[in-house]
Amino acid sequence: MIETILVSVLIIGIGLAFMLIKVLVKKDGKFSSQHIHDSEAMKERGIHCVMDQDREARAKGRAY
């Protein structure tokens, strides 16, 4: 039981260390936005946030 907890804490610690390194090494020192509306690839494909899609469907009268 204790071994499982220690391994879990070690894995979480390693992940946090990598995130810290990313923040320290990057030029702006922050993470990029993870929101769909901020992604250029999603915009090119015409994919929107579910809230925006729902709003558009309601405006067109196609909401369920």
Image (cartoon, rainbow, N blue to C red):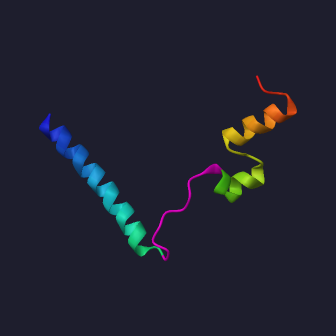
In the picture, measured across the screen, residue 59 lies left or right of residue 12, that is: right
Q: Measuring from the top left, give residue 6's x and y in whole percent.
A: 17, 45
Main SS, magenta residues? loop
Does the magenta run of residues contain 20? no
* Position above or below: 29 against 2: below
* Identity of the residue furthest to the right in this view: 60
Q: How many marks?
A: 0
Q: Quadrant of the N terminus?
A: top left
* Identity of the residue furthest to the bottom in this view: 27
Rendered residue at 23%/51% (across/down): 10
* Position above or below: 41 against 50: below
Q: Quadrant of residue 25?
A: bottom left
In the image, which residues are magenta?
Answer: 27-36
Q: Quadrant of residue 56?
A: top right
Does the magenta run of residues contain 33? yes
Q: Measuring from the top left, give residue 42's x and y in whole percent.
A: 70, 51
* Position above or below: 58 against 39: above
Q: Nearer the viewer, residue 50 or 43?
A: 50
Rendered residue at 80%/33% (across/down): 57
Q: Nearer the viewer, residue 64 or 32?
A: 64
Q: Quadrant of residue 51?
A: top right
Q: Nearer the viewer, residue 59 or 62?
A: 59
* Identity of the residue furthest to the top in this view: 64
* Position above or below: 49 against 40: above
Q: Measuring from the top left, give residue 53's x and y in whole percent.
A: 74, 39
In the picture, measured across the screen, residue 20 lies left or right of residue 63, that is: left
Q: Measuring from the top left, give residue 26's x and y in whole percent.
A: 46, 73
Rendered residue at 21%/45% (across/down): 7
Q: Quadrant of the C terminus?
A: top right
Rendered residue at 73%/35% (across/down): 54
In the picture, measured across the screen, residue 24 lies left or right of residue 5, that is: right
